[in-house]
Image: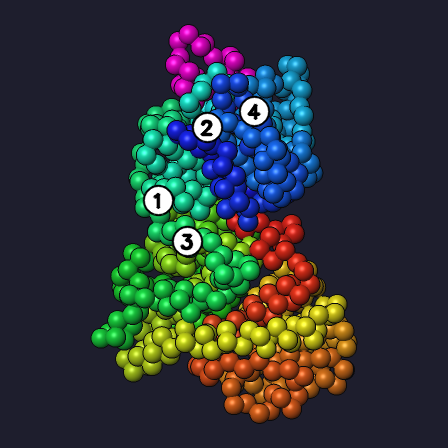
Amino acid sequence: MCGIIGYIGNTSATPILLEGLRRLEYRGYDSSGLAVLNDGGLVIRKREGRIANLAEWIDREPLAGNQGISHTRWATHGGVTDANAHPHCDQSGRLALVHNGVIENYRQLQEELAAKGHTFQSETDSEVLAHLVGEAFDALDGGSLAPRNRLVEALRRALRQVTGTYGVAVMHEAVPGVIVGARRGSPLVLGIGKGEHFLASDVGAMVAHTREAVYLQDGDLVAVEGDGFEMTTLGGGRAGYEINTVDFTEGDAVKGAYPHYMLKEIFEQPETIGDAMRGRISRTEAMPKLGGLEMNAKELRAVERIVLTGCGTAAHAGMVGEYLLESLAHLPTEVEFASELRYRNMPMGRDTLVIAISQSGETADTLAALRECQRKGHRTLAICNNVASTIGRESDGGVYMHAGPEIGVAATKSFTSQVTILTLLGILLGRIRHLSTTEGIEMLEALESIPEKVRAILDQSDKIKAIAAKYIDAKAMMFLGRQYNYPVAMEGALKMKEISYIHAEGHPSAELKHGVIALISPEVPSVFIAPDDAVFGKNLSNMEEVKARRGPVIAIGTEGNRELAQVADDVIYIPPCPDFLSPLLTVIPLQLLAYHFAAQLGCDIDKPRNLAKSVTVE
């Protein structure tokens, strides 16, 4: 949530900041702003609404300067207004600050500052932090401290007073040529260039200029200049760091010929599913090789229970994983929403393995759940898309998704990558317990065939578009599935409401008779996920119940099945596959259905209202 991009170097800062903001807009698009420091002092421009509003103003009144900080906001404290947009100034007006996160004790701090004569121009917690830093800066002796060190120390003293999370960047008129940043609980990345440096909440904002990055850890402070940087800690000591190479290019983060990032990412899934399994299958041993787990076969065999945790789409992937791990490995498995797990006192034995699932690796609730489980002595693994993320670094081991940047707010390719990895894990745990070599080979071969089968489903995009047009006036939608495909029904409903704003619910098909059927009407289509599996007959019976109440039915079924067309109004076919792999196929039509609904309704697909891509605040 929210995005930061800062620049300091030898070229004009404003174009770089605006370009970076556009790349970060998926993180927040309520308002945006920037501050540039030049010979005339600090100049701030900020606007409610999309970044285009800010860019239009700057086109009319250009800004010169070789250093600046900028921000795109997803509102937490205070409404969506120009005044609440970042950057914020201190009491003197000479310091500018941009902030991601939440200052939990800001009201108390604001009252203390107001008693000292401070006045505030916004409703935000972030402005309080700006005032704290400015007050600390003014209180420090400028004669005994170099200007850069004075600003670093001011930020350090201010942050010691706050409770909450932050990724922050600060500039001061009295300290030209320096940007100071810090992080706790909200990501901040230093980009290293030639004679220039960057600070950003996401490497995607600066990948056009550098692929060398330092991921700040909680409690790190950094002083950035054009020709270098210095890392310290909140306690005042030197901070260690590692320079990483970003593993995707500028081209990976652009839409290309697609009208939306979401559609591009849906169509990338044959490749991303393949990338998730590439190099991880041993045919000679008929089992997956997941070295990143940092667990040998003896340690894996000692696991008696698995808890999967995540939020949103990641939680739905975990729900599929529950079915996979229980059926393939015969291991008791459960899924917990990370937002609930972090506050529960859930009984877990010493042989419980906790697996955190997060595309960004920075999801606040998932990170907190991971840390809580570690505090209680449990081994933790991660499935994430950024090996240098906080969850990736703090877990005891894990598996990197290799999905590339996912820009669309509604997750698509990350879901199938997560499910692919959970499938590999299920086969691995099954093979070291009870699955035979023959069974292992058959399962892996079936998994390797999935990318081509996804391509065959993607070829039906125009057909799915026509089905969306047929039901475009729907007031609500039901998504229903059983076993492996119950979580897919949940995910299909989530995609539909996220981007089309149509009320949608996901349920087990058999729950129709237990209350859900009261919602069925001619204005509420039901989407049944009904491949040729062990419960196909049960699903068919549930469809008949809906049809008896004049409810329209869209079915997702297996090629060659003739019974579905006799009951359903519309059928989207998937290639045949084993039951345990069906979620990797059945979710694709649901992603396309949601996309085409939203496109025909004129919705802003990549930036749906009220949502942000990475939820880094509670």
Q: Nearer the viewer, residue 63 or 590?
A: 63
Q: Is residue 135 magenta?
A: yes
Label 4 amino acid? Val
Which tag, 3 or 4, sits closer to the chain's start?
A: 4
Disc 2 packing (10 Å; few <14; some 14–19; many ≥20): many
Of helix, strand and loop, which one carries label 2? strand
Say whether marks 3 and 4 touch (CB < 8 Å): no
What residue is rendered at 37% in x and 68% in y? Answer: 274
Which tag, 2 or 3, sits closer to the chain's start?
A: 2
Of helix, strand and loop, which one carries label 1? loop
CA separation, marks 1 and 4?
Answer: 29 Å
Q: Nearer the viewer, residue 68 or 302?
A: 68
The colour scheme used here is: rainbow
Say whether marks 1 and 2 touch (CB < 8 Å): no
Label 3 amino acid? Gly
Q: Seen from this angle, which residue lies furthest left?
A: 284
Residue 67 is tagged as: 2
Residue 251 is tagged as: 3
Of helix, strand and loop, which one carries label 4? strand
The label nearer to you, 1 versus 4, is 4
From the viewer's perspective, is 396 left or right of 576? left
Q: Residue 403 lies in what quarter of the image?
A: bottom left
Residue 211 is tagged as: 1
Q: Which residues are magenta?
A: 132-153
CA separation, marks 4 and 2?
Answer: 11 Å
Q: Nearer the viewer, residue 26 or 466?
A: 466
Label 1 amino acid? Arg
**Which residue is denoted by mark 4 in the rendering?**
43
Residue 507: where, in percent of width, then height? 63, 71
Residue 453 at least partly seen = yes
